[in-house]
Structure formats: structure tokens, C-alpha cells
Image (cartoon, rainbow, N blue to C red):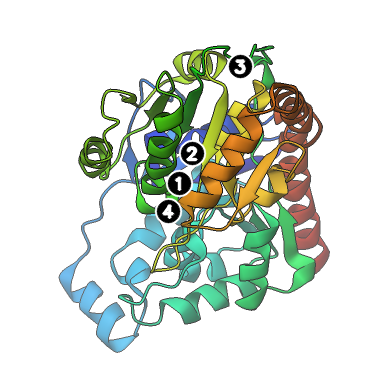
Amino acid sequence: MPTVASYCTTFLKPEMLHIYRQVTALREFDTFVVCKERRSEEKFPFGEIEVAPGVRSNFIRRFWLKYIKKEPPIVYRGEYGVLARLLERRRADLMHVYFGHTGVHLLPFIKRWPKPTVVSFHGMDIQPREDKSGYLDNLRELLQTVPLAMGRSLSLKEGMLALGLPEERFRLNRTGIPLDNYPFKARTAPGDGAWRWVQACRLIEKKGLDVSLQAFAAFAADHPEARFTIAGEGPLLEPMAELAGELGVADKVEFAGFLGEGDLCALYHRSHLFVHPSQITADGNQEGIPNSMLEAMATGLPVAATLHGGIPEAVEHGTTGLLGPERDAATLLDHIRGITSDPARWAAMGEAASRAMQENFEHRAQIAKLEAVYREALELHHGRS
């Protein structure tokens, strides 16, 4: 059985559950993880971890490599040699690098390693980094170098092609949802107007939390029994809690923190509507397809969201939810009123959302497609050898 080295700089941050699902679900490939930092081990147990050790390089050799040979940091700091020996010891046949910016860091290694590397892009890693000289050129070179590059959505494909990726090298890498963990639940519309909204995400700007809160405050004025639960952690927790207070809905909004799969599914099951008005940020940060949105849809929640990133690839406007412009609380409110004012339509949307997840985002089917990309990369490599 061939072996793929799954390279992820930090294994894993809490919001990287989708990577854990991929790494642990491979069936036709053995894998081990290469990382620089091991985190959240209790949330993401996995035995095959190689934490790359720190490097102590000889000063004279480092000076010679850096200033005389003009080698890149990954070489003169000694990281290249450490990684090469590690992959040789583990007999890796190919490497899957998670995130484009990590691929840029490893580009000198990828160009010299005699085996194939594929890189997957997930959203924010397609944006330029103005603070890093030459980064964009290196990103373009990366996309020209790897035999295949994956993106989580077709919207990411557009950005990758714009940066020079040959179209024939792009492969769609959808996030798979383990549907058994998020079963469908039939719901009844609340007769007293006690609609339960939910949003689950990192509490950061691109998630549009301020828009969600503004729309909810207006909705709650007409539906005083409505409640809104925001699950997740992040730097905007305090500002969003303050905003809820300023809008007069602090007693109706719960910030639930980070929730594991079981608790998150239970939250979805007692909710009626998933809200996610994603927005592109000033520095170009955008979504692929939000995992939490897919999980919520699997349980039968209709979606009120935006025409942003890969969201329209998962939410069919008018069938599984409603989509509007970014940063537009008024349209978001109108859409939610349109869904909740018609219980039959609301129920039909929820059922359609669950079916769509079964048809397009089932976990095992997406893993099979990922392994097909690995096999193709190996075949391309052997064909050129």
C-alpha cells in the first residue's frame, strides 16, 4: 500500500476538523502526519505523528549556504535535510501539503524532492501576503511546479487559475461530512415565534457576525421569543458580545464557545435556521465552503447566507436556503422572514438541504476522490520518470 506524508504545520487547530477527517479516513493509502507543532491532541488523537525537530546548524555552514550559495531559508536553516531524512525513513511515496502558504514555504523542497507533492487550498491561503516580499511570485511558481493542486471550491479554482495554475492540474477537493454524526431531524415550526437561529464558526471578520446580530435584533423585535446561539471561539468574542448588548439582545444571544461534534449536532437539532453571512475582508480573506454550514444542512437546517466564496456551490438559492449580498443585514433579514413566514417552505428547504449533503458531500465518497488524486499524482510522476 502506498504511503502519503500529510504535511500540516500545526496539527491541529480546533477549526481544522476537516483535515483530521481526511487524514484519518484514508483507506487505500497509509499515512503519517508531519508537523512542526502538535496541538489539541485530546480532540484529534492520532498515533502516526512526526513532529519535525528543531535544527541546530553549524554557523559557518549556514553562512556559506545563505550568503555564498544564496540558498533559501528552508535549506540554510537545515529544515530541508531534516524533512528529507524523515520522508526517506518513513518511505513516503508522495506528500500532501495542506494550505497554500505552507506549500510556498516548502517550495524549495518540493522542487528538489524526487517524489510528487500535491497541495490543497482551503480559502484564506489563496490571498496575497503583502508583508512578505516575493510571496506572490512564489505562490505562482508553486502552482506551476506541483503536478496537481486541489481546492475546496470552484471559487478557489478561479483564484488559482488567475495565479497561473494550468486548468488541467486543478482537482476539486470537497470537504466530506460524516453524515452518521449529523443525522437528519424532522422539526416543527414554533407556533409562538420562538425561532432558534444558529451560527457556528471562528469568531473572525469574514464570518459576518455583526451582520447576523443586526439582522437578529430586527427579527427579535417582532419575535421576542426568538433566540440566537453562536458557537465558536475567536478574537471577536468580546466585540460581538458588546454589539449584542448595544442592539438590546444580549439576553437573547448565547455565545456557546467551541463545541465538539456531539454537542454541535445537538445544538443543530434544537435549532430552526443556520445563518452564515460570510464576507470578504480588506486583505482578501474568503471562505472555501464552511464546514459548519454543511454539517447543519445535513441535519435538516435551511441556510440564510451570502453569495460568497464556495457557499453558492453548497446552497441552492430558493431550494436549500436563500443567498444575498455580503454586508447586507436588511436583505439577510428579509430572507429569514421569507423562510420563517412560510412553515411549509421552511420544512421543504430543510429536507432539501439534507438530501443535498447526502448527494454531494458524503464523507466516504469525498475520501475516495482524494485518494484518486493521490493515485493520479503517482501515475503522472511514474510516467515522467
Q: Which residue is mark 2?
A: 33
Q: Circle 1 sits in a helix, a strand or a loop, which is it?
A: loop
Q: Nearer the viewer, mark 3 or mark 4?
A: 4
Name the residue rendered at 78%, 29% in the picture.
352
Which quadrant: the N terminus? top right
Q: Which residue is mark 3?
A: 181
1 and 4 marks in contact (CB < 8 Å): no
For label 2, the SS is strand
The alpha-carbon separation of the residues under discs 2 and 1 comes to 7 Å
Judged from this view, the residue extending furthest toward the front is: 222
Amino acid type of the residue that numbered disc 2 sits on in the rendered structure = Val
Spot occupied by residue 328 in the image (x, y as percentages of width and height): 49, 55
Residue 180 relative to residue 196: left or right: right
CB of mark 2 within 8 Å of CB of mark 3?
A: no
Q: Earlier in the sequence, mark 3 or mark 4?
A: 3
Q: Is 251 located above or below residue 175 in the figure? A: above
